[in-house]
Amino acid sequence: MSDREALRLDFLRSAGLAEAVRAPLPGDASTRRYERLTTASGASLMLMDQAPAAESRPCDPSWTPEQRHAHGWNAVARLSAGRIEAFAAVAAHLKSLGLSAPEIIAVDAPNGLAVIEDFGDALFARVIEAGADPAPLYRAAVEALAVLHAAPTPEVLTGPAGDWPLLTYDQTALQGGADLFVEWLPKLIPALAFDADAVAEWRAVWAPITAAGEAGATVMAHRDYHAENLIRLDGKTGAASVGLIDFQDAMKAHPSWDLHSLLQDARRDVAPELEALALDHYFALRPETDREAFMAAYAGLAALNEARILGIFARLIARDGKPKYAAFMPRMWAHLNANIGKPGLEAVAAWMNRHVPEDVRR
């Protein structure tokens, strides 16, 4: 028996769940794993398992950009490193707003273990694949975001495993994400080569977009808000009908961030008509929003996010030997190509035209 398994058994025993039947769930692109627990009474719970030593340290709020780069990717991007205390604190804040985050049943933050409420398997992506009308699901997802965006955004979140800082999705984090594109695309596509001048120009063309993203960071962003992380909850309506998971990397960000993650999804097509309807619904719920300024930021930050995701997919394929992610890349190229055609993104489009041939961008 591994040391990690011994920790899991001790934790389950202390939580009164030693006799629960354990069923591992398929993994994703992270170092986190889940098991479904079935108790003697037939109740279903989830075991969240994230060894704290599996990743580099999360960002200290006091670190400079230089210190963040020295400490590694989680510090640059202001990721939580999967810390259980981050998940628990974000969950508590979401629940305080009437949104549906899993209840924390038991927690051992130092060892990276928690037992949480099981929201079931009705992921938006799966129920849509099974024939459900996507429009009501996306309307409810937008309603949840409107609730989140209307609430005050605390500097520090408090949860059952301790406090967690809600850091800003700042220029360092945004540019760090964009830079994954120039770092990893050439390792997947050797015909691409970005010299030092090209990389410097890349950072220059994104600078106005990252500056606007940091300046407009006014709300909590889930940061991974899409149909694979939203669960339809029967018996609830409106914003509360959306079960939220995988939110441990939440930050203070521009309110467009979660919307473009949802509506320009890397893993599934969202019809342009549905994207338009969802955006209309958001602006109806948030009438004080300057729609023109919001949509300019939406296009710029969506384009940056798509470049980031293309870099991540390239890394997953080239470094980690996960070729399945190649199937998602054409969708991201299509979104990126469309967004860089919007006003304000001419410099990004010009860079792409000079450095990335059209036959690559599809």
Image: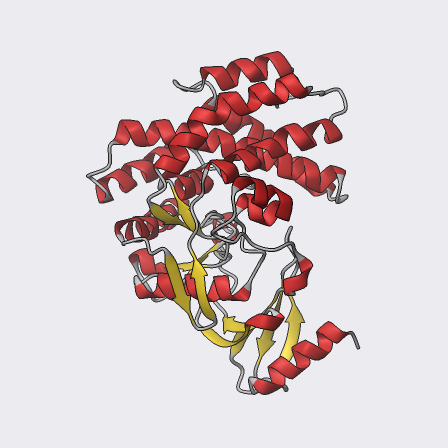
Task: Judge left or right: residue 12 versus residue 292.
Answer: right
Q: For residue 273, which quarter of the picture?
A: top left
Closer-to-camera residue (41/306)? 306
Residue 107 x, y percent position in the rendering = 53, 75
Residue at the right extreme, as displayed: 1
- Residue 31 left/right relative to 176: right
Position of 124 relative to 46 (above/below): above
Question: Residue at 73% across / 26% down in the picture?
Answer: 189
Quadrant location, the N terminus: bottom right
- Residue at 30 percent across and 28 percent down: it is 293
Q: Position of residue 21 (x, y in %)?
A: 64, 80
Q: Point out residue 157 in the picture as x, y percentages from the top left corner.
A: 39, 62
Residue 100 visible somewhere in the drawing: no
Which residue is at a point 58% across and 86% down the rendered structure image?
14
Is there any visible trace of residue 199 in the rendered image? Answer: yes
* 90 left or right of 111 in image: left
Of residues 57 and 224, the one nearer the viewer is 57
How many circles with numbers are drawn on the protein? 0
